[in-house]
Image (cartoon, grey):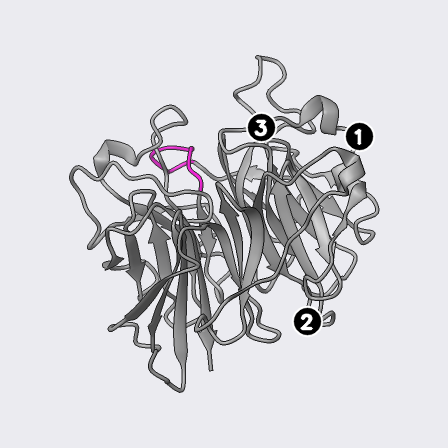
Amino acid sequence: MASRKTRVLVFVGTRKGVFVFESNRARKKWQASGPHIAGWSAHHVSFDQRDGTIRAALNHDVYGPNIHRSRDLAKTWEMAGGPTFPKESGQEVKRIWRVEPGRPSRPNELWSGIDPASLFKSADGGATWEAVEGLNKHPTRETDWFPGGGGLILHCIIPHPTNPDRMHVAISAAGVFRTDDGGATWTPKNRGTRADFLPEGKQTPEVGQCCHHLVASPTDPDLLFQQNHCGVYRTENAGDDWTDIAAGLPAKFGFAIGIHQHADQTIYVAPEVSDEYRYMPEGAMGVYRSRDGGRNWERCADGLPEKYAYLNVLREGMATDSCDPGGVYVGTSTGQVFYSSDEGDSWKLLADYLPPVYSVATAVVE
């Protein structure tokens, strides 16, 4: 890839490897490379701002799950192991869903979420992993956690940027949990969210919700948003209470949600008709944007396909960049990637005919 002073990178994880797209801040012309780690399914790709390492949470039908990493901006990759259960436990990692860098103050800290829903921590850059038993053996697990369509998965990990003892995770289907003591204990944080798939009278449980994706404000760590199986929600008190903000959307169901990296009240969702149909309303692709934390919504579709676009965006299929104006990127399960370099006002096709897109992530490298 060509060298530039500023490099905007988009990492697209697919069923058959990772593709990387590169531009400058103008984001008008792109160079592409890949597939990297061809043949492996990439559920999540992360860029570590601490040292520039790219990591991919990978799964393979023959070789199983592991993490690959690149230390040279995707030029070369190496297998870097991944979390495993002790043999005596009788458990096995079915799939790795997320690999998340730790806090800047802890340069070797990594986190990983897997199926069956469990959290692992590494304190040595991924050389070894330790199960976070306070969550993995939570007292509600046996009675109130159950698999969704993708399995029983821990798919979102959000370390608090300044408080080393606080973290949020999201599990499908169990809901959002928070620790305030470094992972020793975990409290469900689902008040105000619904589980309409449960029997009538039991649809607002403490545990059992299906959070599809969770994002946090880059400037206010108590402000989080989630796209849930049963709505879109906002919390302004770190999950103690959630407010339904789906009014104004054509559907409350969906998987992906994104947040502007400088304006934390600006969020993006890609609604789908329902859990039964799982495609965009009326076969017209639309990304919905709110600039006021979900109080009002507008459809952003200039440049997106308006006919026969029965598209599906998976839980990791949306990302934003840190440019000004901000970029938004959306990948579909049918292999298209669309992007906006003006915060959603207009859209262009970045790539077509890729394998099904599982994840989209970005990095801006100076």
- Local secondary structure at mark 2: loop
Mark before the other along the chain sequence, 1 or 3? 1
Tell me the crowding category of disc 1: few under 14, some 14 to 19, or many 20 or more residues within 10 angstroms, Cα based.
few
Tell me the crowding category of disc 3: few under 14, some 14 to 19, or many 20 or more residues within 10 angstroms, Cα based.
some
208 vs 130: above or below:
above
Q: Is residue 291 visible?
A: no
276 vs 265: above or below:
above
What distance separates the C-alpha of mark 2 from that of mark 1? 32 Å
Mark before the other along the chain sequence, 2 or 1? 2
Q: Which amino acid type is marked by label 2? A: Pro
Q: Is residue 1 left or right of residue 71?
A: left
Q: Is residue 351 left or right of residue 75?
A: left
Q: Which amino acid type is marked by label 3? A: Pro
Q: Quadrant of the N terminus?
A: bottom left
Residue 139 — which label? Answer: 1
Residue 147 — which label? Answer: 3
Residue 71 on image: x %, y %: 54, 74
Magenta stretch bounds: 247-255
Predominant secondary structure in magenta? loop
Mark before the other along the chain sequence, 2 or 3? 2
State the image quarter where residue 312 is shown.
Answer: top left
- Local secondary structure at mark 1: loop
Residue 284 — which label? Answer: none
Mark 2 highlights which residue? 104
- Local secondary structure at mark 3: loop
Q: Of residues 85 and 2, which is closer to you in this image?
A: 85
Residue 118 on image: x %, y %: 68, 41
Q: Is residue 2 visible?
A: yes
Seen at 46% across and 44% down, the residue is 315
Foreground tag (2 vs 3): 3
Seen at 60% across and 30% down, the residue is 209
Q: Of residues 363 and 92, which is closer to you in this image?
A: 92
